[in-house]
Structures are given as C-alpha cells and as structure tokens.
C-alpha cells in the first residue's frame, strides 16, 4: 500500500475519501481553488495545495496544477473522486507517466466507456442487451433525424460524452427534433467539449437499475448488488436505494453476469457502475461509469464494505477483499441528495451562503456525507449538492421511516433547497409502495411541491416571540458593550418602544400579510393577539448563534403557547425570519413600517436572469414581435441550459445582452413590452 494520497476533488466526496484513507494510515493531501481555501476538505487533510482561481477549468480540472501539487507534496497516488477528472483518460494516463498510482481503471478502459456511443458498440459485441437506437459516428443532422424516425418517437438525444444528465433531450415529435438537437449539442459542447450525440428509443416507464462492479489486477471480477436510482429530475438522481424493490435473486444473477461481462470486456480495474434501464422483464445497458458513484454509500450500507478502501487496495495491486459468494446483502438503504436548487422553478440551481446548517446526529442507521459547513458558500462554480443523507434499516419500510425522520431534523437557511421536496417524496404513498419509474417526479410534480399556504397561528406566535427575543438579545448585547449597562434605555419590556405596553407586528408569510399585537404582561409573560384570537405565551432563547462579525442571527426558541410547549429554531437574515419546527421550515418577512411607502413595483413581465450565468444564445432581434411562450434567450449556469420564453404576446423593446455575456442573477435580460390586451386600451 502506498503511503500518501492526493485527492483531486472537493466537497463531500473529498472529505469521504480522506476519512477512509486516514483510517488506513495514508497521508492525505487536499487540493483547492481560491473559492475553497478554507473548505472542510482542506481542513480535514494533512496538507493542502492551491490549484488556482475558482473556476473549475483553472483549478480542479487543471491537470498541470494537479500534477505539480502531487510532485510538491510527494504524493504516491491520486484519487479523482467523481465528476471533474474522474473519467478523463488523459489525466489517468498523465498520472501514470508521472509515476503516480491512479485510483481508477486503466486509461484504455476509461476511453472505451468515455463515449456512450463507443461503449454501446463494445457492449453489443459482448452480447449485453442495448436500447434500440443509433450510436454511429456520422453526425449529419439529416441522418440523425431519419434515424430518429426509424427508431420511432419519442426518442432521446444524448451527448456521447455525457454525464450528470447534461446534453440530454427528450423529443416527442419530429418537428421538435432540430431545435432539441441544437440545444443538446450546445450543452454537450459546453460541458464536455464534444458535441457528438447518439439517439435512443425513449422508454416511457423504465426504472434505472445499476450494478456496482469491482475488478482487481488478479483477474477477479465481482458485483456488490444493485441500486435503484429511478427517482430522478432532469435525468439526474435524487433518491437512490439498495436493493432495488422487487429484485429477485435470479434477476440479480442475470444482471450481475451482464455487468461483469461489461467490465471484463474492457479489462476493467477498480470500482465501476454498469447502468441499466429496465422496463417490464427486459433490461438494457445504458452506460458504464468508470469511477466511484455519488450513491455508492447505499451499497456500503447493505454490504458492510468500504468501497473507497476496496479502491485503494485494488490500486495498490492487492486482491479484492471478498469473493462473489462471500458478498452478503443485508437490510435496506436509501440516499437522498440535498441540493441547493428550487424545485418550484424546474430545479434550477441556487446559490447562497449557508447562514444556518444542521444535520441529525450520525448513527449506525444514519450517515451524513457533507462537504460544507455553516457559513460556507454554495457558489456558481461547482455542483450545487449540499450533502447526502444515507439511512439503513432491516426493511425498506423501516429505512423509509428513518429517512423521513432524518430529513425532519435537517435545517438549511441561506439558499433555496430541495429539502421540503425530499420530505414530500419520502412521504409519498406511491414511493412507499415502490410503485415508481423514472417518470415519478414529473408525474407527481404538483403533489411534491411544498405548499405555500398561510402560516398557522402557532408559526405566527413563534415569529412574534422570535422578534421579541431577538430585540431582547440585541439590547442585552448593546448593554454589555456600553458604559452604563443598567441604563433604563436598554430595557425591552415595551414601555419605551410604544406609548403603551404593546407592540404591533406585521409579517408577510408568502401568502399575505399577517398582523399580530403583543402585550407585555408582568413576569415575562406575553399576550399575543392574532386575528381575533388571543394566546398567552412565554419563551426563552437558547443556543444563540452568531453570523459574520459576531452579530446575532438566531437561536433555539423554547416556547410555551397557552400551556403547550413548542420548540423552534429561528434564523434572521435582515428582516427575513426562517422558523424551523416539527420538521417544517417557514419563511416570514417582518414588515418594515418605514419601507412600506416605497413598495417595489416589479412588473410581472420583466425577463430577468433566474440565476447567475452566461448567455449562450439570443434567439430574437430587437423590435421583433413574439408570441407567448416563444423562446427568446438561452442561459447557461452550472453547466445547465435554461431557456427564457416570452411571458406573453408582445414586442422585444431592447436586448440587453449578447451571446457570451456573463450576467448576475436578477438582471433584466430583455426589455419586453407585452401587447396591450383588448379592453384595457385607453381611448
Ligand atoms: P448520464 O451520463 O447523464 O448519467 P445516462 O445515459 O445514464 O446519462 O442517462 C441518465 C438518465 O436518463 C437515466 O438514469 C434514465 O433515467 C434516463 N434515460 C437514459 N436513457 C433513457 C432511455 N433510452 N429511455 C428513457 N430514459 C432514459
Ligand atoms: P452519478 O450517476 O453518480 O450521479 P453522473 O454521471 O450523474 O453520476 O454525475 C456524476 C456526479 O458528479 C454528479 O452527480 C455531480 O454531482 C458530479 N459532478 C458532475 N460534474 C461536476 C462538476 N463539474 N463539479 C463537481 N461535481 C460534478
Ligand atoms: Mg448515468
């Protein structure tokens, strides 16, 4: 075994690899971009080396900088993690030339599977079943269109070099083929510097089932069972589980043999995943990922094995720790991917500083793989995954209960996340019954969206208490810092703030304005009047939290509401309050009397960038008349394309940006004048 390992990655996977490597006694070397100088993976490692500026191209994808860091640190091996350079054969080769052990398969095996098209050709020869489709090298548009016709609609266009669901377009009708092809090719070129595509029959109710395979240099190949990753959005996994519901030992054997044949066909080494798409009794090869997979922990949970340890052993020339017949699958595991993204806006990636971040305590039943801490930034530069929660129990039903419990104890403030969405997914009866396919999220979309109804009286009362306690706390801090801490001017029992001993508070709960009047009674008791109802309350603030510069941002509120005890976590960001209690988060804005006069007059028709990114294409000209829904501009962020369409019939008054421009979130991209609606036209 080598003595030191450089981890050419960041975030949760870098942390996860370091943990195992450290346990095995290896010296761990981290690398980082300027954006990550104080990231958890850097602090966790024995030493860390700077690669370059924040953009991945200049840091985590910079082969030269990585090899220099390896040389400088005396690393003997390199683990690429997933994403970034993990499936880059040239990088694997360069590591070999530099005398470094690459923790992954040989470059030739990466190359063979690097192109989905070539992989399909190889699998065809090895007798592994394929989805009907076209994966030839001729990329003429007419040919692709006629192949699509031959395959039969709906079809799926995929980037040959693809990954992460990028460069993939479902096409329902021939007339949409050309536009979909253009957009898939653009996204593929931007993400993989390779715009070649393949076309496949689009299966409408399939499941994604993948096999974890492992091979060593002694010629042993085995599989560690399957994972079901059918719960997807944008063709990307959201919840994964092992084993796959409904899997029989016979079918596992059959799929396992196919997966092993795939690995053997390319002289595989180390960890790999063979992805199949299954419909009815049939299963077809989709692609092979020649690296550790994001969702590998569910396999670890049911096999009791550490896959990173296996990877390191194989890379060091040792044999696989088990033989196929020694592999035991026990119980059931789920993983959820907690993303900074907005499920209500088609899962658009989000950014922001994690003002507050809490996970439930880890146990044999719960594992939390996170690569960020409270205070860290989810930036536009990298993947927006915040953490993975992995649960295990004897049965699927019990594991699912654990999942719901773990999600309820997870708290994130500072960026939009899919947390509430995951909770609804985990609670959905059809999911509990394992009645799903890859279209589950699309089909149940509406039920899975968290509802933005009115805040309950409990939440409003807690919001009032949060505000009062925050004032108290701030007054206490100001007093402690002042020369006369006993001055009556620091008192917060209400008499000074208003003429009487009450305070009127107005919150916006997203559904509307909610008013409350709080009366200050003796002995720390409050009476909260809410729309005709009156509640006697008392509350205490515990575990107060500071933000940047030591300012107060919130804490845990222990409240007594008319004899009922409630606990909530409150986090303030300016006037915005996030209240988390009972597994639910609620955002409220405290109405500012002073700012009330200048309420913003944002027009609904403004076409603003929904995220920071790059304009890749402008599809209209200034002055053009457009119809409602007509695509106007294509924006790319986090390697994902997003098309903005006309909100209504109208005219393009002006174009603000051109292709290639970088834009901030919220800037107006196109000046749009909606057509005047008949009947509203002034005489
Ligand atoms: P990536 O490299 O992005 O992971 P995959 O080829 O593995 O690309 O496909 C990603 C997902 O897209 C799959 O998990 C599956 O849900 C869906 N998908 C892929 N091929 C098909 C197909 N032919 N029909 C229906 N869905 C598909
Ligand atoms: P998996 O099947 O394991 O989800 P994918 O092919 O979908 O694999 O993508 C691999 C994973 O790598 C993604 O889930 C994503 O989180 C991560 N990833 C992809 N591109 C990047 C990137 N540029 N930076 C960081 N992580 C990335
Ligand atoms: Mg895939």
Image: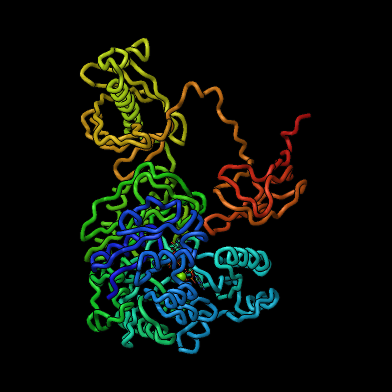
Residue 604 x/y as whole percent: 61, 39
* Residue 488 in the image: above or below residue 18: above
Residue 145 point in image, percent of width and height: 67, 74
Q: Where is residue 395 in the image (x, y as percent from the top left)?
A: 24, 66
Quarter of image, res 310 = bottom left
Frontmost residue, 491 versus 333: 491
Q: Residue 537 appears at what percent x and percent y?
A: 25, 26
Left or right relative to 468: residue 188: right
Picture residue at 29% right of the left edge, 20% below the top? 479
Instruction: Name the residue: 28% across, 13% down.
Output: 487
Residue 279 visible in this rendered orientation of the protein: no
Residue 184 vs residue 223: left or right?
right
Find the residue positioned furthest to the front. 72
Looking at the rendered image, the quarter that the N terminus falls into is bottom left
User: The C terminus is located in which quarter?
Assistant: top right
Q: Which colour scheme is used?
A: rainbow
Image-quadrant location for residue 369: bottom left
Above or below 541: residue 71: below
Q: Is residue 660 visible?
A: yes
**575 relative position to 643: left or right:** left
Numbered marks: total: 0
Picture layout, residue 622 above or below residue 210? above
In front of the other: 453 or 526: 526
Q: Which residue lies furthest to the top in this view?
A: 499
């Amino acid at each position: 075994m080598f003595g030191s390992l450089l981890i050419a990655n960041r975030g949760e996977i870098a942390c996860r690899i370091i943990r195992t490597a450290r346990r095995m006694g290896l010296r761990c070397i981290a690398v980082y971009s300027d954006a990550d100088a104080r990231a958890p993976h850097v602090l966790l490692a024995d030493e860390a080396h700077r690669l370059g500026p924040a953009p991945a191209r200049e840091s985590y994808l910079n082969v030269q900088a990585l090899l220099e860091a390896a040389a400088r640190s005396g690393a003997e091996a390199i683990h690429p993690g997933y994403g970034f350079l993990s499936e880059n054969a040239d990088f694997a080769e360069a590591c070999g030339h530099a005398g470094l052990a690459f923790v992954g398969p040989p470059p030739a095996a990466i190359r063979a599977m690097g192109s989905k098209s070539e992989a399909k050709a190889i699998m065809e020869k090895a007798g592994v079943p394929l989805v009907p489709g076209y994966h030839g090298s001729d990329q003429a548009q007419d040919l692709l269109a006629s192949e699509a016709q031959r395959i039969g609609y709906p079809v799926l266009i995929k980037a040959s070099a693809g990954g992460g669901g990028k460069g993939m377009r479902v096409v329902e009708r021939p007339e949409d083929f050309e536009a979909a092809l253009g957009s898939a090719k653009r996204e593929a070129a931007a993400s993989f510097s390779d715009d070649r595509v393949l076309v496949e029959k689009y299966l409408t109710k399939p499941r994604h089932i993948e096999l974890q395979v492992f091979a060593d240099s002694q010629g042993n190949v085995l599989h560690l069972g399957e994972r079901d990753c059918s719960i997807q959005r944008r063709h990307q996994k959201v919840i994964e589980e092992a084993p796959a519901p409904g899997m029989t030992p016979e079918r596992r054997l059959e799929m396992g043999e196919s997966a092993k044949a795939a690995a053997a066909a390319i002289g595989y080494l180390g960890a790999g995943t063979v992805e199949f798409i299954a419909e009815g009794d049939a299963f077809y090869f989709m692609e092979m990922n020649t690296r550790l997979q994001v969702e590998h922990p569910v396999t670890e949970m049911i096999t009791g094995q550490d896959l990173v340890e296996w990877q390191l052993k194989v890379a060091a020339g040792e044999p696989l720790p088990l033989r196929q017949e020694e592999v035991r699958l026990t119980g059931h595991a789920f993983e959820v991917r907690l993303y900074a993204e907005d499920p209500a806006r088609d899962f658009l990636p989000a950014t922001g500083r994690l003002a507050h971040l809490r996970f439930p305590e880890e146990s044999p039943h719960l594992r939390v793989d996170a690569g960020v801490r409270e205070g860290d930034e989810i930036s536009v530069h990298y993947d927006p995954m915040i953490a993975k929660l992995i649960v295990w129990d004897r049965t699927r039903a019990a594991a699912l209960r654990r999942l719901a419990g773990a999600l309820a104890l997870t708290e994130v403030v500072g960026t939009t996340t899919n947390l509430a969405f995951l909770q609804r997914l985990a609670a959905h009866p059809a999911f509990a019954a394992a009645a799903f396919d890859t279209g589950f999220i699309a089909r149940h979309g509406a039920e899975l969206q968290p509802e933005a109804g009115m805040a309950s009286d409990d939440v409003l009362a807690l919001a009032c208490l949060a505000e009062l306690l925050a004032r108290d706390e701030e007054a206490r801090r100001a007093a402690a810092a002042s020369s006369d801490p006993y001055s009556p001017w620091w008192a917060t029992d209400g008499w000074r703030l208003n003429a009487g001993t009450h305070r009127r508070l107005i919150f916006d709960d997203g559904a509307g304005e909610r008013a409350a009047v709080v009366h200050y009674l003796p002995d720390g008791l409050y009476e909260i009047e809410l729309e005709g109802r009156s509640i006697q309350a008392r509350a205490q603030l515990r575990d107060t939290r500071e933000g940047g510069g030591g300012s107060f941002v919130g804490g845990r509120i222990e409240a007594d509401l008319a004899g009922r005890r409630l606990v909530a976590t409150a986090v303030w960001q300016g006037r915005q309050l996030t209240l988390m209690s009972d597994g639910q988060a609620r955002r409220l804005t405290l109405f500012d009397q002073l700012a009330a006069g200048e309420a913003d007059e944002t027009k609904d028709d403004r076409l603003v960038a929904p995220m920071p990114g790059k304009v890749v294409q402008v599809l209209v000209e200034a002055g053009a008349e457009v119809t409602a829904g007509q695509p106007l501009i294509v924006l790319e962020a986090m390697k994902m394309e997003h098309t903005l369409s006309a909100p209504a019939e109208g005219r393009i008054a002006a174009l603000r940006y051109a292709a290639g421009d970088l834009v901030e979130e919220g800037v107006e991209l196109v000046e749009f004048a909606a057509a005047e609606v008949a009947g509203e036209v002034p005489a």
